[in-house]
Amino acid sequence: MREANIGLSKKQRKQIADGLSHLLADTYTLYLKTHNFHWNVTGPMFNSLHLMFETQYTELALAVDLIAERIRALDMPAPGSYSQFAKLSSIKEETGVPDWKEMVKQLVEGQEAVVRTARKLFPLVDAAHDEPTADLLTQRMQLHEKNAWMLRALLN
């Protein structure tokens, strides 16, 4: 198969794909955590949180595909296993069932972690003039910052 010739060197494509792999791992881990909390939330905020978590995990499920496809468009392999995601993600998984407030707190931290991962990659992407990846990162940061704000509002 012919190597991609998209105006980025192989080294640039590899560095960007490596950063996107971290973003993919964070996004997938947050997806799994959010879905878990959707299933297991209880308490006075049940209905609101159950619906909010469903909206968020559905969006995250679509996002992992967009991120993985961008990695592939850069002609690099996308990680796709739990063990790879565990090594790459900055988000800790939750194996217990915390109360609703702790769930929200953890999801705020997860949303913010995704933003930090995307923001960390942005200078490399910007320097390479990789506008499609910059666009993806901008959209991801905007959405996760908004989600974190909405979740934080529940804790005040």
Image (cartoon, rainbow, N blue to C red):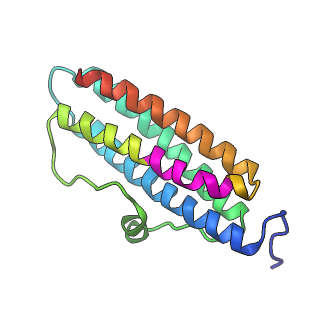
3 to the left or right of 137 = right
Image quarter where the N terminus lies is: bottom right
Farthest residue, direction bottom: 1
Q: Position of residue 73 (x, y in %)?
A: 72, 61
Q: Position of residue 138 (x, y in %)?
A: 61, 40
Q: Is residue 24 a member of the stretch shown in magenta?
A: no
Q: Is residue 119 a member of the stretch shown in magenta?
A: yes
81 to the left or right of 16 = left
Residue located 69% across and 52% down the image: 126
Residue located 21% across and 34% down the image: 41
Up/down of 5 relative to 59, above or below: below
Please give the range of residues in magenta. Answer: 114-125
Image quarter where the C terminus lies is: top left
Up/down of 96 relative to 77, above or below: above
Give 75 or 137, whichever is nearer the viewer.
137
Q: Position of residue 20 (x, y in %)?
A: 57, 59
Which quarter of the figure has residue 68? bottom right
Up/down of 57 relative to 27, above or below: above
Give 114 or 94, whichever is nearer the viewer.
114
Residue located 75% across and 48% down the image: 131
